Image: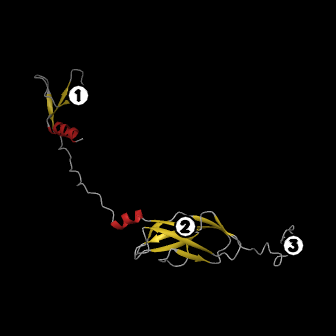
Amino acid sequence: MPLAIIPMNSVAQSEIYRTVDKHGNVVFTDTPPASGVSSETVDMQPVNTAAPPPTIPPREPPKEKEEASSATVSITAPANESTIPMGPGNFEVAASVTPALGVKQKLQLMMDGEPQGEPQGSRNWALTNVFRGQHDLTVQLLNADGEVVTTSEPVRVYVQRPSVINNPAINPGAAAPGGPARPLAR
């Protein structure tokens, strides 16, 4: 590109001649006309040029970010798509961190996008009284400022819990064990 600019600058700064040919066409040229041809010199405005902005070297990412990109967190228990059997909805979650947690780093367990307890240095959590249904678990690695460095892949669990709807002792319209559903008394 600089080579293309140099000839343009030299053309723009040389003399420009205006002539009219025998057919009445106006011609602008940088070549002086032949002798005997009437011409006039065109006064050109100076070429508007500007120096390019200085080159700014790319920033080096902070070392903490480099370390963060190499950190991984994963949930080791329960396995993805696990079913927590019928009961009070209690189960444990375990995670692994590579490399090992730093002095000021913490882990935060998330269930369905909501934090479960406070961030902690331990890689294990005991969940109690979890509602029945589908739940997505993730573990976040937090730096000293409480910012998320990385997050584990989600693990989905299905919690089974006793239901009042299906308990004939509480709900007279519920099915008896092994029997058909009974209509509710009105």
> Mark 3: few, some, or many residues within 10 Å (few <14, many ≥20)?
few
Earlier in the chain: of badge 3 and badge 1, it is 1
Q: Quadrant of the N terminus?
A: top left
Question: Which residue is nearer to you in this view: 82 or 42?
Answer: 82
Residue with the mark numbered 3? 184
> Of the numbered discs in the image, which one, if any, rests on residue 78?
none
For this view, does 53 lie left or right of residue 144? left
Q: Amino acid at mark 1?
A: Val
Spot occupied by residue 22 in the image (x, y as percentages of width and height): 21, 20
Which quarter of the figure has residue 19?
top left
In the displayed orientation, state which residue is furthest to the top. 22
Is mark 3 in CB contact (under 8 Å) with mark 1? no
Mark identifier at residue 76: 2
For marks 1 and 2, the one nearer the N-term is: 1
Q: Position of residue 146 (x, y in %)?
A: 44, 74
Q: Amino acid at mark 2?
A: Thr
172 or 107: nearer the viewer: 107
For this orientation, the residue located farthest to the left is 35
Neighbour class for label 2 at 10 Å: few (<14), some, many (≥20)?
some
Determine which quarter of the picture holds residue 131: bottom right
Looking at the image, is 35 positioned above or below residue 141? above
Q: Which secondary structure, mark 3? A: loop
For label 2, the SS is strand
Q: Position of residue 10 (x, y in %)?
A: 16, 38
- Marker count (numbered): 3
> What residue is shown with label 1?
26
Q: Can you give x and y, in whole percent of width and height, for residue 174 in the image?
A: 83, 72
Q: Label 1: state its secondary structure.
A: strand
Real-space Cα separation, disc 3 to disc 1, in angstroms: 102 Å
> What is the basis of the colouring in this image?
secondary structure
Mark 1 in CB contact with mark 2 (< 8 angstroms): no
